[in-house]
Structures are given as structure tokens and as C-alpha cells.
Image: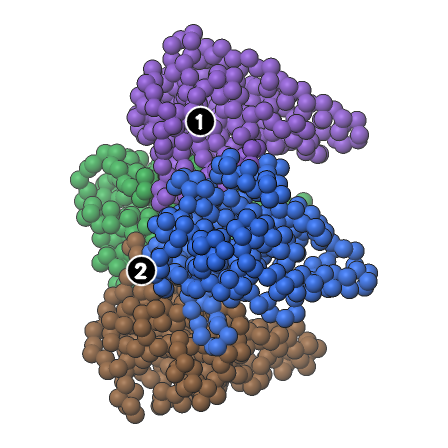
Chain colours: A blue, B brown, C purple, D green
Amino acid sequence: MDKTSIYYNNKQKLKNPVLIVGLPGIGTVGSLVGEHLRNTLKAKRLATLYSPHFLHQAIMMKNGGLRLASNRFYSCINEKTGQSIVILVGDMQAGTPEGQYEINERIVRFFKSLGGSTVYTVGGYNISTQYVNKPRVFGVATDKETRENLKKEGVIIGQAAGAVWGSAGLIVAFSKEHGMHGACLMGETGMLEIDANAAKAVLEKLKSMLKLDIDLSSIDKIKAETENLLKEMEKAGGAPGDQQPPPPSQPLPYIR
Amino acid sequence: MDKTSIYYNNKQKLKNPVLIVGLPGIGTVGSLVGEHLRNTLKAKRLATLYSPHFLHQAIMMKNGGLRLASNRFYSCINEKTGQSIVILVGDMQAGTPEGQYEINERIVRFFKSLGGSTVYTVGGYNISTQYVNKPRVFGVATDKETRENLKKEGVIIGQAAGAVWGSAGLIVAFSKEHGMHGACLMGETGMLEIDANAAKAVLEKLKSMLKLDIDLSSIDKIKAETENLLKEMEKAGGAPGDQQPPPPSQPLPYIR
Amino acid sequence: MDKTSIYYNNKQKLKNPVLIVGLPGIGTVGSLVGEHLRNTLKAKRLATLYSPHFLHQAIMMKNGGLRLASNRFYSCINEKTGQSIVILVGDMQAGTPEGQYEINERIVRFFKSLGGSTVYTVGGYNISTQYVNKPRVFGVATDKETRENLKKEGVIIGQAAGAVWGSAGLIVAFSKEHGMHGACLMGETGMLEIDANAAKAVLEKLKSMLKLDIDLSSIDKIKAETENLLKEMEKAGGAPGDQQPPPPSQPLPYIR
Amino acid sequence: MDKTSIYYNNKQKLKNPVLIVGLPGIGTVGSLVGEHLRNTLKAKRLATLYSPHFLHQAIMMKNGGLRLASNRFYSCINEKTGQSIVILVGDMQAGTPEGQYEINERIVRFFKSLGGSTVYTVGGYNISTQYVNKPRVFGVATDKETRENLKKEGVIIGQAAGAVWGSAGLIVAFSKEHGMHGACLMGETGMLEIDANAAKAVLEKLKSMLKLDIDLSSIDKIKAETENLLKEMEKAGGAPGDQQPPPPSQPLPYIR
């Protein structure tokens, strides 16, 4: 395996597919969103991406299995709109610039070959040193029309500055190069390793924009658990923002 | 040498070969197991793997010689079963993801070309901060049948979580991709740089599973020496787990 | 995108073009010079360079857009001399030796294909721990004739020692290999992150050498602001050189 | 420049050439030896090696010039024996394993193409925390005959252990793979950045072995200066070995 490769698990005809990218990153926001959508939309595995640019780790599975690290495409039909939803989740992102460029352009080319024309990536936007109770959603997008649509949903445009690292940024930037529409939705977060509240804020935007029939109660559970932990820490004398609450005690239903 | 290459030292016909991979890693468990098997089974050099992804070091030999770093395949016949045993040992593993992917897939393809269908890799599983007196052996495997066989031997399946780094993990994961059976056997270890006790625990499993005619007394010697050092350190006031005992004073009979 | 690539935005015929390279680096001197020239000379985008060796970041734009990182060629005609001026600016430089070699030789080959024969790169030369009030300009060049011309302009030749990192150095060195004349002009600077004074010193040399019709008042504004900040810090008790003044409070008119 | 490349400066017929490699490394021993031989033997430039695996620096020259980093082959005739001597010196070594493998195998192939069959690399062997007054010379070699010859010269064989980093090790190891004789001569050194005494010890061995007509007085000057500095530091109260003496106050006659 010299190069990043994508294999079909289950080739299927898609209808005007939209891609939602939820990979590991700041506040685990991307993974939480991606895995939540995959679970609640009961999406089926479409294809698997392997890459020699992932960390040299094999992933242990709960049943005692072992597998290569991967990014995984799932798909389903949005019954309300008839549109195909493609969701990309995964174990990790590449650790080098060269690997990131290769993988992310490969993802964009693959999705274009499926007939896709619109891409949403999800990430966290870390601008606070405290837990964010009412996280805003910031957005950047390839074109004016997409930006206007995001604004109507209450996504904040034109206030974020700097750079978007990794797949969340490069997939959108490559979408532009390949003639597609793309946007990155970033949930405001504050130093938490796993921020379900930021993820929920992004999910609400996606739900509204794409008319998704999803239930947010499982993400609410993780959110509630995190908030309880933070309250207990404050009672115990820790100033909020001073300490990192541990990840939720139960394994996340989403991860892996 | 642009790419990882394998050269035959001595081409020979193998019978239903099984591969045992014992490379440097956590607790030196892999190397201890690999070198012990190579020595006690009097295996002959079959082939040598060189790679530009190894560290840029040449290895000094006891006789004043100098050679490229390598991984080395040895083979022998198990007289009890008639099966060929192939043992892989070496000086080092690659230091980058790309190098690890290249080398480990190369190893799997080479072994498949020898007619092999089963692979065992060996590593340490570091979950203790103290010396482990009765190390358990944890396992992950490519398929249910292999996992059931390991369970019968007392290998613990489905309790390890996370990722297996390097050759121990990737060779098994690639074996699956290439249609072979594979398992990684991990000896429980606790912060020791060279843990002969963990190695012995894995050797006992391999001995039973593969009906190997091997004597464990030389590994017992290293084990005893380490344990004596630990006792002396405790007497001298060091709490167990606080200090790293030095590697055994005599050069290991196994390494290089 | 496996390799560094350059795309034309607007192919045009150039007349005896000279290249001025102003990329990010020590004291931001290169970027300040490049962006100032691009703005005041009203240069038009000629071509864009993308590379998988840039950091894996997408760049957020003020309007809420997102784009790949790039280096960008602009061109204009020097009305006084009739000569084409090509200016190279960009978001970043490659982070690895291999990436730097690839990108910088690619730049030199591209400029040669435009009919160019002379290249000036700009950088900072950091040899002071204090703000430099009257920065000198140091130079290195591919050939004796170019060095003599620089001396006439008051550029100091033969006193700098060591190595020039990145594009500022490699583009000149590759220009020599490809039969072109090249020089690197380094403005003396002292630990400032953004040193408009050093940039101004280099701009004055370029203005004189290339008979450029440019106004230095906008760079004077940044220079004045920085100097005021430094004075306030001194009044407040900070010894000069002890503290880094913050970058100017207003966004730089030049950057991005 | 995707790959390491060697260009002839001056193609010439060589007679039974021997290669001496003196590149930057521990104690600067290799460079001191290489540059001393090049100067005193008045060797002429034969060829130049460039590589994208060197650091992304261009080298400033005393005359105000700028050039790519390189390794440089020089050659001369040993009047006493009629044998061609090829000397390899340079600005730096590659910083990655892949770069080191590429460059060092390239060097070996090039030298073999010149009709060469014997290679000596030079390095420092750092086993002391104090200045070494009477440095020993340790050796490793590709074959028994070469080792026996080194022993006759008083080179210590079979006592060094571990690995030889970089060109000093890999060029010898690749020489073996390509059917040539090779040895690495390591001057004992103790934490000095520039150890002319260790270099002198190696030069004496090479002088004797290859019947070189060389004068060691210029290396004696650097040695004397370093030793004076060390004495002054001891008088001033610094225990020997506690402090690093600065490099000699005059620029080394050898470097660049």
C-alpha cells in the first residue's frame, strides 16, 4: 500500500448525494457528529479508505479482532427529501502535510465520482478557556450562495480568522478546486476533549439544513454527563476552566 | 535502495509454514521470544529484509564487522508436526508510518509467497507499573476460529482495547487483508525494558499451540537475574515500580 | 496533488521580467516587502503555486471563504523602464527539506520559462537583540557582477556568514544552477516578529535598483506604530529588547 | 531535484582509487580529517553531490556568493604509490533515514563506477566526558582481511559496540553490499565540538596505511589552541569536562 486507497464495501446508486465529514479533531466534535448521524440514520457501509499516512497502529476491536486503521464512508437515503446522505467517519487523520493532502484530495475525488456536488465538514472552534454553555456555530464556505444559506440557519460567517487544520479545512478547499460546493461548520468549544454540547449545536444546524430526521437524545446524554462532572469539579473547589473533566465514564456509544 | 527489499539467503521448500514475528518493542518481549525460538530451534537464515525506513545506523558486530540494519527470516522444521516454522527477528522497526506500512505489508506478501497462511506476532502489553509475577497473555486475531483456538490455550481475548503499534499490529492486520489467519500475542508487562517473564508467558503459549520442542531454561536465566535485581533494589529501599532495574549484567544471549 | 503545481490565472507576455520574492520568514520582512510592492504597484495575479508540502491548513478569508494555502505570482510593468516586475508572495513555506527543494526549484524553473533572468529574494537578517533603528541591508548573490551592482547601492556584501534558510536562500542558489542572476537582500532586524523598518530598508534598495515608482508611506505607518509601542514599553519600565511588542493593533494592510 | 544527484566538475582517469570520507559528525572529526587531507594533498574537485534531503539552507560564501549545500569529491595522486586518492567532504549530512540511505548508497555506487574497491570513513567515537589526551582509534570493517590490516596499524577492532550513525556507518555497510572493502576509523573523543586531537589520531593511521605524504602541523595548531583554552578554563576553576571550550578563535582553515 504505497498510496491512499478506497475500496467499495457495497457499491450502490446514490441520488444527488451530500457528504458530511465527521473525523477526529478539536473537541472530538467531528467524530461525535459523524458517528451520531451514522447511528441514528442507520447508514450502511459504502466504502473504506486505507492509507500508509495514518499512524502505524492496528485497531483492536471489542470482539478481539484487529484491523487496519481506516476512514469509512456510510450512506443512507433521507426519506423526507429523497437525497442520499454520505457520512465519513474514521479512526484518525494523517499526521503529515503530504499525507493530509493525498487523503483529502482522494476523498473529494471519490465523492465527486459518486455524483456528489455538496460537502459539509464538521469541526470544533476553540476560542474559550471555559465550558461553552450556548455554543455558536461558525462557518466558512467555498462560495457566496452557500455562505448565504448558512447565514439563514444562524451560522456565523466572516468572523473566524486564521486557518482550518486537517480534513475539515482541506476537504472544503479541495471541493472548491474540483468544482463542488463545500462548507466547514465549526462548533464553539472550550478546551474539552470531548464536547458533546458543541457537537449538538452543529447537529441542529445540519438537521435543519438537510431536513434530517434525527433524534438528539443520545448526544444529550453525553452532554448531560459532562455537565454534571463539571459541576462536581466546581463544588470540589476547582475553578471552571482550570481542570479538564475526564471523558464520560461509559464508553461513548459513537466511537468505533 | 529506494524501497524495502527482501533477499534470499538460502531458498528452501517450506511445508505449510507458520510465521512467528519477534521484533523489538514494548518490554523487548518480541525480540526475546523471536531470538529464543531461533536459537533453541536451530533455525537457519532464509532471507533478509533491508529498508531505507530503518534508522540511518550501521550495526557493529562483535567481530569488528559492520552491516546494514535488517529484519531476518529464519526457518526450521517442527519434527513433531512436520510443519515449517519461519521466525522473523531484527535490529529495529521503521520510525515513520509510511515506512511501517511498506515494511509490514512487504513481510506479509513475502510470507504469503512462501505458501504461508498463519501468522503470530509477539509483543508486550504494558498495563502495570510494577513487575508482573504471573503475566497473562492477551490476544487479538483476524478471525473467530483463531480467537477460539487462542481461548482454549488460556489466551485472553476481547479485553484489550486501543491500538497495537508497529509490526506486531500491522502484520496481523495486513494478514487479514491478504486472506491469511493472524494473531498478536501480548505478554503482560510492567515498565521493564527487558521483561523475560512476559516473554516466557508467550513462549509457553506458542510451545503448546504449535507443539514446539523447546527448552525454556535460557529464558529462565534472564528472568531469574532480573528478579534478583528487583529484590535487591527493594531491600535497598526502592519501592517496587519506582525504579527501573538495569538490563541483565551479562549480554543477552539472544540479541544480535 | 502529489507534486507542487503552478497554474496560470492570467497568462501574459512579459518583457525581460525580474522576480522579487517576498515570502514569510524572519521578521516578516519578506512578506512585508512583497505585499507592499504588490499593492503599490497594483500588480495583477499571474499564477498560483499549490503544494502538498505546505502545512495541512486551509486559509480562512475575510468574506467567510476558504482556500488552499498557496504562493502567488503577480506581475506589472515598470512604466519607467518598460520592464516586467513579477512579485511572489504567499501564506507559507514548506516545512521539510524535500518540500523546500521541490517548491523552490519549481519556482525557478517557472520563472525561467517566463523568460526571466534576474531574481531578488528578500529576508530578515537577525543579528541584534534590540530594535534596529537604522537597519543595514546585507546581500549575497550568484555572481560578481550582481555583487558589484549591489555594493553600489550600499548593500553590504561578504560580511554575512552561515546559511540562508528556505526560499530566500534556495531560490537564489537554484537560480545560479539554472543560469540566472540572483541575489538575496536581507534587512537587519532584531527579534521583532513584524519589522517594518527592516522591510523599508530593503524596499529603498529595490526602489533605487529597479527604478520602481513606489510610495513608502503605508510601510511608514506600520513602522511608526511599532516604534510608538516600543517607546511606551520603555516608559513602562521594560528595557528595550526585553519584550516583544505586540504586532500592530490594526490588521496589516499587506497580509493576505 | 527529486533525487540525490552527482555532477562531474572535472572528469579524470583514476588509478585504483581509495575513498576517504570526512563529513560533519561527532567532534567534527570527519570534517577535520577530510578537509586537512584535501588541503595538504592539494586535491582537485572531481564531482559534486546535491540532495533534496539536505537541510533547506543555502550556504553563504566569504566572497558574498551563495550556493546549494553539497558533498564534494576531490582527487589527487599519491606520488609515493601511484594510487588515486578520492576525498569526500561536505557541508552536511541528510536529516532523515530515507535521505541517508539514498545519499550513502549513491556515494558508494558512484565510487564503484570510478573503479574503486576500498573505502575509509572517518568519525568520532564519544566515550569520555573529558578531553582525551591520547585518543585511541577504533575500527570496524567489512571483512577479516581489512580488519587484520587495521590491527597491524594499532587500530582497535572488536571492542566498539552499538551502531555507527550516518555516512560513516552506512557508506561502509553499503560498500560491503556492493562487493567492496570498507572500514570506519573512529577517533576517541570526549564531548568537544571540534576535536583536532581525535582527528590527528585518525590522520596518523591513514598516513601510515596509505603512505600519504602529509604534514600534520596545521592540525597541530588547532589542537594546541584547544588545549590552551582547556588549561585556562581549568585555572579559572572549571573542572575539566564540566565546560565546553569554545571553538578555536580563528576560523578553521579547513571548514568550507
Q: Residue at x 24, y 74 (%)?
A: B114
Q: Is residue D154 left or right of residue B229?
A: left
Chain that bears disc 1: C
Q: Residue at x 28, y 85 (%)?
A: B83
Relative to D43, is A103 above or below? below
From mark 1 to mark 2, how far is it between C-alphas?
39 Å
Residue density around tag 1, few if under 14, some if 14–19, many if 20 or more, within 10 Å: many
Residue C227 appears in view: yes
Q: Are marks 1 and 2 in contact (CB under 8 Å)?
A: no
Q: Residue at x 26, y 88 (%)?
A: B82
Residue D196 appears in view: no
Q: Residue at x 35, y 45 (%)?
A: C2
Q: Which residue is mark 1?
A: C88
Point out which mark residue B4 bears.
2
The answer to whether tags 1 and 2 share a subunit is no
At which x and y percent is residue C240?
72, 29
> Callout 2: helix, strand or loop?
loop
At which x and y percent is residue A228?
74, 64
Q: Disc 2 marks which amino acid?
A: Thr
